Image (tube, rainbow, N blue to C red):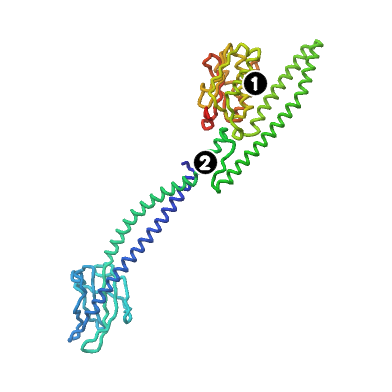
């Protein structure tokens, strides 16, 4: 996934949302656990407080006594963390042995009658304690007295339980986060699968394997598919109109060129051979340039992805039969080594133009053999070879550059220019090299590996 990947963005935002949600949930759970521990501790202290209230009494000499202290051995251990204390308004106080020589410093506001109060105070040895207190009235030999009872416990155990719970919770939430991130990744992959299908469909259209995008897509992706298909329909209509205009142009120029040819013949008959040859050369140049522009107009009017692919073998065989009937082709043996169902992602007319120009050029320079081979180049490529003199390496590179043509010296460079124009429109290239037959090998190959079409359907 690259920096601009939609998958990466979704994964980052999803992972961030998962981590944030689990962090908030973890903090909330830790807070709830802490409150639960303190509530349980307070409930236990209230039990001890009731036990203390049931055992408090006033002796005959007026002293406070606890006949039945709370039943927990920690009250007898010095600074054990569990304490009780009872005192009256006169300052008389009794306390558990665990308080040793200290006293719980209770707040000044005393609880009301029957009311139970809770406080967090600083206890023995500076430890933080939770105190539960209430006031009870005790009747002795004299008038009734109000006694303030308090039971306290340090919060160290609660803090240790909270830390242990937080550690266990962090481990559990970490595993949960990992599982949720994996689930989010699977969710993103599944959710973006229709876009992958659209991408593959566009690649198939570009390579000529299919004319349109399939309609079986989710409702959210269907508008995109419909727009792409509508764009392809519009391009096809533009292609049709461009071809009609090209055909009209060709027909419109044929008559003036035919009249010009007739004038050339009359000039030659009148003995004006020099002028006739000049006009004939100009007419031939016009015809060839018109043919070139008409070929260029066809693919440039649309895209190669909006036209069906063309099977190579029937076209190559038809061209070989036609060229074999020409004066130069009568003495040439044609070898068509193209497996059935080998395709080129071009319109059929463009395949005929490309192969026709290459095969005609090969016939013109061949000694006795011309070969069309689908296995001579990279996958998806088609080569036209001959056993002629070939082209020097420096010339092969030069004639493929823009503006360079070997036909300036009387050779057949314009045919190669037409081939290159057609291939440029489809994103393919023309490679010139040495043939195994000894002459030139002209190879049609995809300009990019992604644009290659399988040799067989």
Badge 2: how crowded within 10 Å, few (<14), some, or many (20+)?
Answer: some
What residue sits right under mark 2 in the picture? Answer: 197
The tag earlier along the polypeptide, 2 or 1, is 2
Q: Quadrant of the rendered structure where residue 390 is?
A: top right
Q: Is residue 150 among the parts visible in the rendering?
A: yes
Residue at x 36%, y 63% (from the top left corner): 31
Work out whether 435 lies above or below 200.
above
Label 2 sits on a secondary structure element that is helix
Q: Nearer the viewer, residue 213 or 42?
A: 213
- From the viewer's perspective, tell me whether residue 58 is left or right of residue 36: left
Q: Nearer the viewer, mark 2 or mark 1?
A: 2
What residue sits right under mark 1 in the picture? Answer: 414
| Residue 332 point in image, percent of width and height | 60, 13
Residue at x 20%, y 79% (from the top left corner): 66
- From the viewer's perspective, tell me whether residue 162 is left or right of residue 318: left
Badge 1: how crowded within 10 Å, few (<14), some, or many (20+)?
Answer: some
Mark 2 touches mark 1? (CB < 8 Å) = no
| Residue 278 point in image, percent of width and height | 75, 16
- Looking at the image, which residue sits at the far right? 270
Q: Which mark is residue 301?
A: none
Q: CA distance from mark 2 to mark 1?
A: 42 Å
Label 1 sits on a secondary structure element that is helix
Q: Quadrant of the rendered structure where residue 241 is?
A: top right
| Residue 4 point in image, percent of width and height | 50, 43
- From the viewer's perspective, tell me whether residue 258 is left or right of residue 454: right
| Residue 289 point in image, percent of width and height | 69, 23
Q: Is residue 432 among the parts visible in the rendering?
A: no
Q: Quadrant of the rendered structure where residue 391 is?
A: top right
Count the numbered circles shown: 2
Work out whether 217 lies above or below 68.
above
Residue at x 31%, y 59% (from the top left corner): 165
Residue at x 52%, y 41% (from the top left corner): 197
């Amino acid at each position: 996934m690259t920096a601009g990947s939609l998958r990466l963005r979704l994964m980052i935002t999803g992972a961030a949302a998962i981590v944030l949600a689990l962090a908030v949930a973890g903090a909330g759970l830790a807070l709830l656990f802490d409150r639960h521990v303190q509530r349980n501790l307070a409930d236990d202290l209230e039990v001890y407080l009731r036990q203390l209230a049931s055992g408090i009494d006033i002796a005959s000499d007026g002293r406070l006594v606890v006949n039945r202290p709370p039943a927990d051995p920690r009250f007898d251990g010095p600074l054990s963390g569990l304490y009780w204390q009872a005192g009256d308004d006169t300052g008389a106080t009794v306390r558990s042995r665990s308080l040793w020589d200290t006293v719980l410093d209770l707040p000044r506001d005393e609880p009301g009658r029957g009311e139970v109060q809770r406080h967090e105070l600083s206890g023995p040895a500076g430890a933080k304690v939770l105190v539960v207190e209430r006031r009870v009235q005790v009747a002795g030999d004299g008038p009734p007295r109000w006694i303030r009872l308090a039971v306290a416990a340090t919060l160290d155990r609660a803090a240790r339980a909270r830390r242990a719970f937080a550690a266990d919770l962090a481990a559990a939430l970490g595993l949960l986060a990992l599982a949720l991130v994996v689930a989010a990744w699977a969710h993103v992959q599944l959710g973006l699968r229709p876009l992958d299908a659209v991408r593959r469909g566009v690649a198939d259209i570009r390579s000529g394997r299919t004319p349109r995008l399939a309609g079986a897509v989710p409702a959210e992706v269907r508008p995109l598919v419909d727009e792409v298909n509508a764009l392809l329909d519009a391009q096809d209509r533009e292609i049709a109109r461009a071809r009609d205009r090209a055909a009209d142009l060709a027909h419109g120029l044929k008559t003036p060129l035919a009249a010009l040819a007739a004038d050339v013949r009359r000039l030659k008959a009148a003995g004006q051979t020099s002028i006739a040859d000049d006009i004939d050369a100009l007419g031939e140049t016009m015809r060839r340039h018109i043919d070139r522009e008409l070929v260029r107009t066809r693919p440039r009017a649309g895209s190669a992805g909006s036209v069906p692919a063309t099977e190579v073998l029937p076209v190559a065989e038809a061209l070989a039969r036609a060229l074999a009937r020409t004066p130069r082709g009568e003495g040439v043996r044609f070898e068509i080594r193209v497996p059935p169902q080998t395709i080129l992602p071009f319109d059929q007319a463009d395949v005929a133009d490309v192969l026709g120009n290459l095969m005609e050029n090969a016939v013109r320079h061949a000694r006795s053999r011309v070969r069309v081979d689908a296995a001579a180049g990279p996958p998806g490529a088609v080569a036209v070879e001959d056993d002629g003199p070939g082209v020097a390496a420096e010339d092969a590179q030069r004639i493929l550059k823009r503006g360079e043509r070997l036909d300036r010296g009387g050779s057949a460079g314009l045919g190669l220019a037409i081939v290159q124009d057609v291939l440029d429109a489809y994103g393919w290239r023309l490679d010139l090299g040495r043939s195994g037959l000894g002459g030139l090998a002209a190879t049609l190959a995809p300009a990019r590996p992604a644009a290659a079409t399988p040799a067989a359907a």
